[in-house]
Image (cartoon, rainbow, N blue to C red):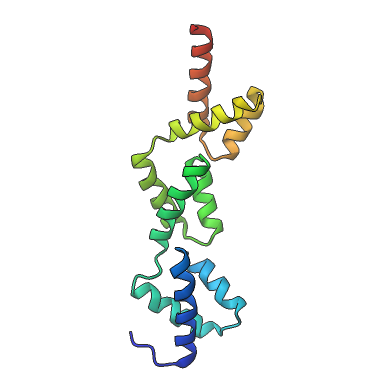
Amino acid sequence: MEITDEQVKAVVQCAARSLARTEQCRASLERKLRQKEFDEDSIKQALDFLEEKRYLDDARYSASWVRNHCAFKPQGTIRLVRELCVRGVSKEIAVNAVKAYFENVDETELCRLAFQKLVSKNKNEQKIMKSLAESGFSYKIIQRVLKEKKVMEHGS
């Protein structure tokens, strides 16, 4: 694909500058370009070009976002997929990125970390369960972590 249209070149340059600063998904980059009042056709052509050249890749963005996000904020599968979809990533790509992340990371361990953080804030069990569910951990994982806590309390 060769770009000849000057407007499309301007959009590509603007988008490339933005991508050089940080990985982005197509939807967020498209929103930014619209705010700069580029025309829709030029935006589409520019983004197609950037995807073809692999400068723009929603799967790569999603994998990076999940890794970085979980490093600071332990969250479960449900919430991570939802967050990516809200950012404009397709559900299929979001699910694949989250699944790939949890091939190397134990979701139960992330839930334990979130649990410990809530315990340190003196939250009661009901609030802890609610908060863990809102963080995207499944009921099954939450129950496992709560059961471990009770076993440790009664075993000590």
Residue at 38 percent of width and 59 percent of height: 60
Residue at 50 percent of width and 79 percent of height: 14
Which picture quadrant has residue 48? bottom left
Q: Position of residue 27 (x, y in %)?
A: 52, 67
Q: Position of residue 109 (x, y in %)?
A: 44, 31
Q: Is residue 100 left or right of residue 86?
A: left
Is 3 placed above or below 126 here? below
Residue at 54 percent of width and 52 percent of height: 83
Q: Is residue 101 left or right of residue 141?
A: left
Count the labels in the image.
Answer: 0
Is 94 placed above or below 147 here? below
Q: Is residue 70 left or right of residue 1?
A: right
Q: Position of residue 39 (x, y in %)?
A: 56, 85
Q: Position of residue 117 (x, y in %)?
A: 57, 30
Is 5 placed above or below 153 here? below
The quadrant of the image that shows the N terminus is bottom left
